[in-house]
Amino acid sequence: MQTLLLYLLIMGLVVAAVFAVVWFVFGRGEDLPPVEPETTLTRLPSVGITGDDVRALRFAQTPRGYKQAEVDWALARLAHEVDDLRSVIARLRDREPVPGTHAGTHPDDPAADGAENAAGAWRPGPPTAPG
C-alpha cells in the first residue's frame, strides 16, 4: 500500500513539474496582452451599419452576462443609425416632385388614363372602349 501511495505522490510531483515548465516556457498561449479594463473589442462602422455588422457584433463576457457599457454603446449607435435612416426616408417622402415627371402629364404617356394613389404608386384608370 505504501508503494502505491509513494508512486502516486511521485507521479503528481512529476506532472506538476512538467506543467510548471510548460507554463513558464510557453506562457498563457496568447500572442497579445490582455485587454485593458476600460477598453472594448466591440466594433461597429462609423456610418452605414449593415445587418451583417449587427450579426457579427460580440460583447465581452462578465460573470453576470455582458458588459453593460458595451451593450449600451452598441444600442445607442444602432438607435442613431435608425434615426438617420428614418430622417432620410422622411426627407425623400416630403420632397416635392419635379414637374413633368408624374404619370399622365405627357400626352404620349401610356399611363395618362391612370392616376396616382396617395403613396405615389400608379393605379390603372377606368377601362376605355376600343375605338
Image: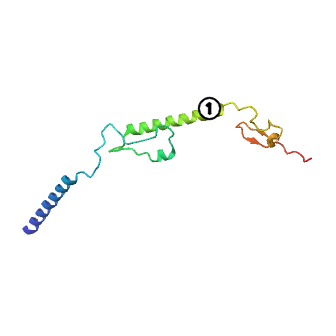
Q: Quadrant of the N terminus?
A: bottom left
Residue 30: % across, % down: 28, 50
Residue hosting label 1: 91
Residue type at mark 1: give it: Arg
Q: Is residue 7 left or right of residue 51?
A: left
Quarter holding residue 72: top left
Q: How is the image coloured?
A: rainbow
Q: Position of residue 63 (x, y in %)?
A: 32, 45
Q: Residue at x 9, y 65 (%)?
A: 6
The furthest residue to the left: 2
The foreground one among 65 and 130 is 130
Q: Based on the displayed image, in which of its 4 quarters is residue 91 positioned? A: top right
Q: Of helix, strand and loop, which one carries label 1?
A: helix
- How dense is the environment of label 1, judged by Cα within 10 Å: few (below 14), some, or many (20 and up)? few
Which one is nearer the viewer's eye here, 54 or 9? 54
* In the displayed structure image, the side of residue 26 where residue 3 appears, left or right: left
Looking at this rendering, what residue extends furthest in the right direction?
131
Side (left or right) of 6 relative to 106 = left
Measuring from the top left, give residue 17's x and y in whole percent.
14, 58
Q: Is residue 51 above or below residue 89?
A: below
